[in-house]
Amino acid sequence: MLYRLARPWLFRLDAENAHNTGLAALDRLRTLGLTRSPIPWPGREVECMGLRFPNPVGLAAGLDKNARHLDGLASFGFGFLEAGTVTPRPQPGNPRPRLFRITEAQGIVNRMGFNNEGLDTFVANVGRSAYRGILGINIGKNFDTPIERADEDYLIGLRRAYPLAHYVTVNISSPNTRDLRSLQESDALDRLLGALKREQAALAKEHSRYVPLALKIAPDLDDTQLDAIAKRLMDHGIDAVIATNTTVSRQGVEGLPNAAETGGLSGAPLRARSTQVVAALAARLGDRVPIIAAGGILDGAAAVEKLGAGATLVQVYSGLIYRGPALVREAVEATSAFRAPQRPAA
């Protein structure tokens, strides 16, 4: 109810200003004791990556890049939160304006460029948070780190995130950092995943705790590329894959205001393609690597669609902008009635 009243005012603001204003208001409401305690959702638990999630509906990375708002966001009833993308060093991201609504299609275009305050601030924010639910930390590379040295940034991110995270996501699929998506190519991906798995093993021994690794991929991949990625996920023992990030396609939004802006498109226009990628991965991976689905979830039916395509968990972001916290409750209730068919081994 409160979000329905606030949305018309927020949508009169520049999209990035509205984003920051909304999160600041959420923090203020929590300080005043006006947010709800996290919803327990009994009977909705899901096993994935060796972890037990209270429910299958999570927050996607990008909304809380610096882990400043975990406590307020937890009040929405998520089964897990993913914060980031965080890079080793602070960086401003791309020039503003860099976030745009395509309201008629319930879409969002962003070219943020991994704007964040860096790992030191991120780690401190997590340490101050009272949130004790499942936390994913999404790591990336700095924009000025040469692509041939990207492994170094991801290893720094993994080391710093490991003691704090329940799982760590490796983001190689944002279209807004130059050459980043080239890390999805076979040889580069082999090198990166190999280095990360070796470091994960060392950190597991050091901390006496195994923290799963997830890989976040783009929707703009053809069947040959999906074949190669699926093989490497299995070969390297990656714990999960997140499908998908934003798309550079503008199919379905051609000619609409802001559709021609450079950046990645998310929201309702991404729904069909992200579901296709989930299904394609499920056919290739079987039950060997679980899939976390993101892209175009604006109602409970879309969340169920992702599970039906083969996902174990789902994540929302753009849907929150258009629907508010009510989307989380709707998605949890819808997915609680879903019973997944048995997935064959790959």
Image: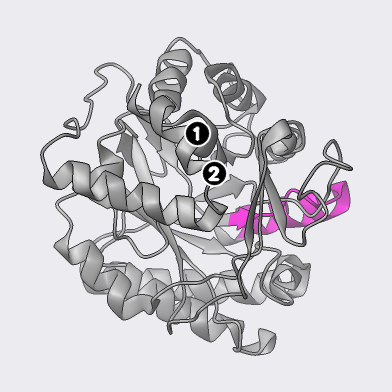
Tell me residue 255's x, y (percent): 88, 43
Residue 237 seen in render: yes
User: Magenta-highlighted stretch: main secondary structure?
Assistant: helix
* Mark 1 Cα shell of 10 Å, populated few (<14), some (14-19), many (≥20): few
Tell me residue 171's x, y (percent): 57, 63
Was residue 218 drawn as part of the magenta stretch in this picture? yes
Dot 1: what SS?
helix
In the picture, the quarter occupied by the N terminus is top left
**For residue 114, which quarter of the picture?**
bottom right
* Mark 2 Cα shell of 10 Å, populated few (<14), some (14-19), many (≥20): few
Residue at x 62%, y 52% (from the top left corner): 234
Dot 2: what SS?
loop
Which region is colored magenta? 216-235
In the picture, the quarter occupied by the C terminus is top right
Residue 69 versus residue 180: which sits nearer the camera?
A: 69
User: Which mark, residue 302?
Assistant: none
Vertical arrangement, residue 42 with respect to residue 180, above or below: above
Amino acid under label 2? Arg
275 displayed left or right of 136:
right
Tell me residue 63's x, y (percent): 45, 52
**Location of mark 1 (residue):** 8
**Location of mark 2 (residue):** 12
Residue at x 62%, y 75% (from the top left corner): 95
Amino acid under label 1? Pro
Vertical arrangement, residue 149 with respect to residue 46, above or below: below
29 displayed left or right of 250:
left
Vertical arrangement, residue 273 with respect to residue 129, above or below: above
Tell me residue 24's x, y (percent): 30, 53
Q: Are marks 2 and 1 in contact (CB under 8 Å)?
A: yes
Residue at x 77%, y 62% (from the top left corner): 262
